[in-house]
Amino acid sequence: MDNLENEIENKVNETLSDHKNLKNSDVLPSAEHQDEKNMEMHNNKENLSNQDNKKEKNKKEKKPKKIEQEINQEDKVQEQNNSLFQKQELQENISSTDNQENQEDNNIQEQENEVKKQEDEIPISTTKKKDHSVLKLCFIGASILILFLIIFSTIFALLNLNNDKIISGVFIKGVNVSNLSKEEAKTLVQDFITPKLTENILIKHDDYETTITPEQVDCNFDVDQAIELAYSIGRSGNLLQNNYSIVSTLFSNINIDAGFTYNSEALDKMITDIADKLPGKTIEPSYYIEENNLIITNGKDGITTDIPNLKEAVINSLHHLATNQTILIATYEKKADKIDLAKIYQEVKRDPVDAYYTSDPFVVHPHVDGIDFNISFEEAQKLLEEEKEEYTIPLKTIKPNKTTNQIGTEAFPDLLSEFSTNYYASNVNRTTNLKLATNKINGSVLMPGEEFSYNKVVGKRTIEAGFKDAAVFQNGKVVDGLGGGICQISSTLYDAVLLANLEIVERSNHGFVTSYLEAGKDATVVYGAIDFRFKNSRKYPIKIVGTVSGGVATFKIYGKKEETEYDVKITTRKLQSTPFKVSYIDDPSLAKGKTKVIQGGMYGCKVETYKSLYLNRELVSTTLLSRDTYNAMTKIIARGTKE
């Protein structure tokens, strides 16, 4: 029994010792290993129990039966006690084992948390070290690059330090000035621009054509400024900026556009003139007074030039010297305005005013005839209800008590200007037209600041007004037209007005050079489309006196000379001459081999007209009046085809 108890106690101690070793070890046992230990303890207990049973069996076989019974009895009691004791021991061991297992689980969890914490800390620390290394490498690389750029820039700058040429890749208005000195570049660019200034830019709308040259509107290009700008490239910045400019220009060329200026007033006049001469243009309602009648002409729908668009296109072509381009005139349809009778009545109706003048200061106050409708306003409105091209409203003139002519010649004491042109008196119809127009103008008086309109004074050229058919320019040919020849009267008056130093408001040249005046001195008129207007820009009133007689048409302008009176001289300068073409037509009524000139040819040209003012024979000023273009007139020859 004692031996059995000792063996059991030893086994229990071994078990407890194993648990302590597991607890103190660096590596914790796994669940599978713990199961193996428990199984081993169970097997050991079974083996000890089997051994005890065998020993007890042997003792029983040797002892007497009685003693065997007593022993058996005692063994039972002892066995029960041992069993109870083992049971308690086992429970205590199991409980201790459970506590140890719980403690071990907690230790395992703590170790796992510690390992995880270390794992989390290790990558962060490593990443920081790696980032620090990358930044350090970047800093070193950038420093090396900057040092290289500085060294390269310094060497590059030293190589270009003594270069006095424009760098490569620089153009001025498309002209390559690379590696040229300033003087060489200027010569090259001017050689490109100069011939372009006299080349034509074609302006066209359907069959209507005209031209304009950069020279006509004083186009100017600031070549010097462009050269300086070209030379400054690669020199105007710091070391790095200059080197960058030099290198970048090698791969991406720079084109410098020279500064561009032009005469805006001259261009506006040319654009307006082109628009006024456009065939099929819209004609607005107009009116004029003829004797005792107010003639109102209905408007006519047509097309109108888009002047801003045309001006922009012309400026763009001038700027880029695009003399090889054709500008198409943009137009849009426009309906003519309705006749505004109330407005016309307000402009026409006036009360009579007597003429008078004062000596100190000298001021002439001309008479003013009173005008009014000779019918009621309602009756006049009713006349306009009928669809007609022209309406006639009778007027009554109310004379003042004293007219300007009645105050005598002292009101217009000085002859300010005089101009004459010749005509063929044998052409009866044309002579009649000249006299009609002149008679309407003769005696007109303009007060200071007052405007004269040729079309308003002369009126519409109609058969009823007495005008005849005579030669006119139309579509490049000379044809008969009603009122032919009256442009000679407007042209003669134009030159008289210039010599009187009066302000020109509106004036246009003919399409062809006239036979009675040199180019640049004429003034064409077309009723309802092109007018000749001027203003009395002098301090005193003027009086116009016109005559047509003996083949000479003359206008004289009278007034009072001012304190400073200039002598006026009108000159012209021909810029270009255009030869005429010859056209042949077959004439079956003319014998074969015979020819006949149907229309004479006429040279075209471009001219400038100037007005020079002299005081005591000294030149004071010279003013450009106009730049005019005249087309060449085709010579037409008939060839006989009759056999």
Image (cartoon, grey):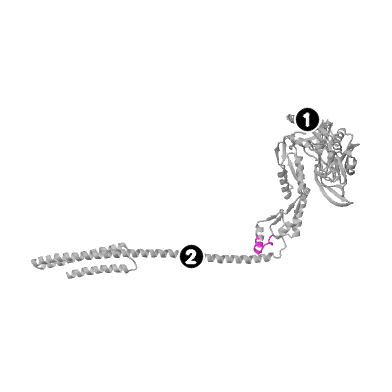
Q: In the drawing, does residue 639 fall left or right of residue 382? A: right
Taking depth in this image into account, of 210 and 51 the one nearest to the observer is 210
Asked if the residue at tag 1 contacts the one at tag 2, i.e. Cβ–Cβ closer than 8 Å, the answer is no
Residue 213 in view (yes/no): no
Q: Residue at x 14, y 64 (%)?
A: 76
Q: Position of residue 396 (x, y in %)?
A: 81, 32
Q: Circle 1 is placed at which residue position?
A: 375
Residue 259 lies, with reference to residue 643, above or below; the image says below
Q: Which residues are magenta?
A: 233-244
Q: Position of residue 556 (x, y in %)?
A: 88, 41
Residue 150 in view (yes/no): yes
Residue 539 lies, with reference to residue 20, above or below; the image says above
Q: Position of residue 58 (x, y in %)?
A: 13, 67
Please tell me in which quadrant of the rendered image residue 439 appears: top right
Q: Residues within 10 Å of mark 2 (few under 14, many from 20)?
A: few
Taking depth in this image into account, of 323 and 499 the one nearest to the observer is 499
Quadrant position of the C terminus in the picture: top right
Residue 568 lies, with reference to residue 300, above or below; the image says below
Which structural element holds mark 2? helix
Amino acid type of the residue tagged 1 in the rendering: Ile
Taking depth in this image into account, of 93 and 299 the one nearest to the observer is 299
Q: Circle 2 is placed at which residue position?
A: 128
Which structural element holds mark 1? loop
Amino acid type of the residue tagged 2 in the rendering: Lys
Residue 388, numbered circle: none
